[in-house]
Image (cartoon, rainbow, N blue to C red):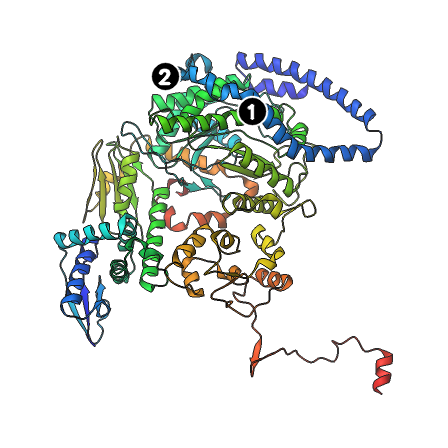
Amino acid sequence: MEIVVFLCENSIEGILTGVYDAWAEALSSGLGHARCRLQTELLQPELFCTYRETAPDMEKAGKVIRTLRKRLGEEVYECLCYAMASREPDKAEAVYKTIVAGLSMKQGYRVLDKVTDPYVARCFDLKRNVGSEIHRELEFLRFQELRSGVLLAKIHPKNDVLMYLGPHFSDRLPLENFLIYDMSRRKALFHEKEKDWYMMEALELDAGKAGRISTEEEYYQDLFRMFCHTIAIESRENRALQRQFLPLYFRDVMPEFA
Amino acid sequence: MRRKNICLIFIKNVDIIEHLFYYISMEREREELSEEKKTEYRTAGSTGEDAEENVESNIEESIEGNIEGDAEETAERNTGYGCREIEERKELPAAGPRSGEALVKEEGGELPVMEKLRILTDAAKYDVACTSSGVERKGSGKGMGNTKLAGICHSFSADGRCISLLKILFTNYCIYDCKYCVNRISNDVERTAFTPEEICSLTMNFYKRNYIEGLFLSSGIIKNPSYTMELIYTAIWKLRNIYRFEGYIHVKAIPGADAEIIYRLGLLADRMSVNLELPTAEGLRNLAPNKNRTTILKPMRQIQNGIVSSKEEVALYRHAPQFVPAGQSTQMIIGATPESDYQIVSVAESLYQKFALKRVFYSAFVRVNEDKTLPALPGGPPLLREHRLYQADFLLRYYGFEAKELLSEERPNFNVLLDPKCDWALRHLELFPVEVNKAPYEVLLRVPGIGVKSAQRIVRGRRLSNLQFDDLKKIGVVLKRALYFICCNGKMMYRTKIEEDYITRNLLDTDNKRPPQPDIINGREVTYKQLSLFDDVTWTRKKLADIR
């Protein structure tokens, strides 16, 4: 039996376009969903598989999104979006098969309760992983004030979570100009004072401009470093516990550990 | 006399000296009083045993009696304040801080902010609560900040505690002499005070850089509680109205302050807390001579009533001002006084039930002062005990346990080796194993290894399909602990015995994830053992003779 593998772009639109195409193929050719697969990258070609590339198409993705929100509800849709931001290679397949499972149910909004379905369980895992990384970025991201008054934060998340930081920080700092830069994906999230936020891809950070911090910046970094140092109770010291909550991975951008 | 001189060296402000003299005269009176009391005690309790019994019954009374009794009393006294009288004063906050600048004498204004922050952080670090949870609020778009329901921790200090709020004291000048406190008046420490501007700019600049989630402001007592609260109010008012800060603010309500100012402050803050300090009134009398249980419970009751009436108002008028929307909390010191865990948990339970507190925090006693009334702690602060209390606290709040289920008069302290939930389950093996696919939610919650989230997922998941152990693992159940207490479709995960000793032994053996399995040959359990001539000690002369 031959399996058709759809290769899609590694983005929400890309994956959802892939879902649309795979769905059409499964129905029209009579293969069924069991013999369609979705991948974001071609790691190692397998035997007895035909590979088809799909180009991201906003119209197709939009149709899928509308269906998902209507039939599965916002909660499931959010879960799928989180899962699609994951760095794991099998995310597209998990999302695709979860959608299949959800749309085949009468009460589609309950699809996440189907813990016995391996794809749903995987989707839930991915969502949990991405969700916890988003939360950690909200916790440990640090802004630096540049001489121009712009706040700059550099992050290097493992999953593609940049987009999910936008609503939180623009609600929190509506009167600030800020910029969050994802160093590993070379993407940036901009927010202009009293305006909405937007994202740009394939950007290089101007090291010269980004390095020019405001005169107050170092002073406040020193103050906070001293605060963090002083607030600890010596007789309770527990570095292992500190590492458990705040892994070393995040500390390179945090001034209190500089 | 020596002690008083030391204090004077550090105080340059005349105003402070004035109320220091006031304090000294008070102290003298109190010393005389306590002398009298001591002699009274001696004459009253002629035998040592009697006196001990007295103390014991006092403690008992103070758990039940004090909380209930004082609460009733304060409730009666407070009903007038709780809502009605305050309604009339609602205009006050809009009028701005009363003579705010005049109140702040800028004590210690000559120190740089860096030094002040160091001193006042150092003085505040023994306060426990550093949470920013309990209220979800979007930004208005005109200021800075919002709050998240779950709260956000922004960093973790070297002791593993979270840094969520800028936790500082307004000042560490204090007229009180609580024996456990680093800021007590008889201590020779550097004293200083922030100005409201300094607090505001620190908060705003830290918040902007995503260092903190908000402000936690407490203070030593200058002059009197109301005066101190007025200072705190000035700072918070500025922060909210001039600097337009919309993040999280946690302030301490100081017992003994005017109800009116506590109300005004509550409209600006997200959370308020009144420190219970020590679990029983007896302990408080011994270690904090200037405080007493009644004055502590009074503002607690007032805040509770305020929260209730504010919620009713908000239900009616959506834009009515919210009073302490994130609820109130309290904290007590563990291990400074001889209370048992049972007493402490009972106090916490009655606080949750009768005062509708959001959280009770426990702080392992750290010996910062040398004082003969304080216990020596050769092993450091009682951290494990604190941990067990927090575990029990969560069982009370989220798992439907009652204090008397966890502990009793006969077993007043927690098991050192096992967490309270395992400990409870081992004492109630008649209820186990529980069938995961059928047991009600409340029963699932009581299984060690199943938490609130996994119990919810089990209940939702089993509607759609029958659950197996593999599924439980994916759901997030800790099978290492749960396997002794659950079965899926009538089968347990491994061959285990429902026996207290057996389960305890296996739970404590952290290296093995599964219990040792017996060998089965031809369907029969075989137990074998290395044969040794020296093991068997039942050989007696008589037996030997018989064999011969």
Mark 1: which secondary structure? helix
| Label 2 crowd (10 A; few <14 / some 14-19 / many >=20) | few
Residue under the image location 61 percent in, 13 percent down: B22
Judging by the rendered image, the residue that carries numbered circle 2 is B94
Judging by the rendered image, the residue that carries numbered circle 1 is B75
Front in this rendered view, residue A60 or B337 = A60
Q: How many marks?
A: 2
The amino acid on which the numbered mark 1 sits, given as a three-letter code, is Ala
Image spot of residue A250 (x, y percent): 37, 48
Q: Quadrant of residue B214?
A: top left
Residue under the image location 73 percent in, 17 percent down: B32
- Dot placed on the residue nearer the N-terminal end, 2 or 1: 1
Image spot of residue B268 (x, y percent): 40, 24
Mark in front: 2 vs 1: 1
Whole-angstrom CA distance, mark 2 to mark 1, is 28 Å
Q: Quadrant of residue B429?
A: bottom right
Residue A38, placed above or below residue B114: below
Image spot of residue B243 (x, y percent): 33, 24
Front in this rendered view, residue B36 or B486 = B486
User: Image check: B144 left or right of B384?
Assistant: left
Label 1 is found on which chain of the structure?
Answer: B
Residue under the image location 19 percent in, 50 percent down: A66
Viewport quadrant of the C terminus of chain B: bottom right
Does residue A145 appear in the picture of this structure?
Answer: no
Image spot of residue B345 (x, y percent): 60, 41
Viewport quadrant of the N terminus of chain B: top right
Label 2 is found on which chain of the structure?
Answer: B
Mark 2: which secondary structure? helix
